[in-house]
Amino acid sequence: MRYLSAEWLEAADQAVRNASPAPSGPLIVDQRVDRGTTTICWRTTLGSESAIVGVDAAADGADVVFSQSFETARDIAQGTADAHQAFLLGDIRFEGSIDALIAHRSSFEWLEQALAPLLAATTWD
C-alpha cells in the first residue's frame, strides 16, 4: 500500500493498536508532511496502555510536532536517511517540548518497531 495514503494511515493505526503497550506515555506527536500543494497530517497518541494513529493533527494539544517534505519522510521511513541528521540539516522542523521528546525517546523506538511490518509492505511512489 502507498506510503501515507489514507489506507496506509489506517493500517498504521491497526499496527500500533495491536503492538504491545508503548513503553512510556502520555505523548502526543503530530506529523505534517508536505507533498506538493498538499499537507498530510496525522497524530500519534501514545499512552501507557495504548497507542493510536489518527488523521486529525490540526488540533491543539500536541507535545511535539514534526514537519518535513514527503521526500524527507519517505527517505527516513525507508532507512536511506537518518532522522537526526535531517533535523540538524533543517529538513525536519520541530515544535513543542524538547523535554518531552527526550523523555519519551524509547516511545519512538517502540513506534519504529510497531510499524516495521507495515513499512516492509509499503510502496513508495
Image (cartoon, rainbow, N blue to C red):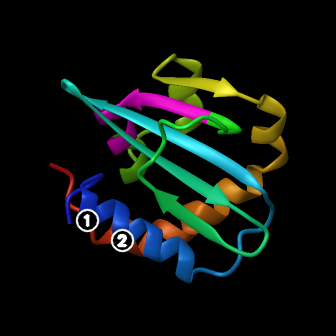
Q: Nearer the viewer, residue 70 or 76?
A: 70
Residue 91 lies, in percent from the top left, at 45, 22
Q: Amino acid at mark 1?
A: Glu
Asked if the residue at tag 2 contacts the one at tag 1, i.e. Cβ–Cβ closer than 8 Å, the answer is yes
The single residue placed furthest to the front in the displayed view is 59
> Can residue 66 be found in the magenta stretch?
yes
Q: Which residue is mark 2?
A: 11
What range of the chain is rendered magenta? 65-74
Residue at 27% x, 54% y is 3
Q: Is residue 17 above or below residue 108?
A: below
Splitting the image into 4 quarters, where does residue 51 fall? bottom right
Q: Which residue is mark 1?
A: 7
Residue 115 lies, in percent from the top left, at 47, 67
Instruction: Tell me the CA gap for discs 1 and 2.
Output: 6 Å
Residue at 47% x, 36% y is 58
Splitting the image into 4 quarters, where does residue 46 fall? bottom right
Q: Nearer the viewer, residue 33 or 73?
A: 33
Residue 32 located left or right of residue 71: right
Neighbourhood count class around disc 1 (C-alpha, 10 Å): few under 14, some 14–19, many 20 upward: few
> Which structural element holds mark 2?
helix
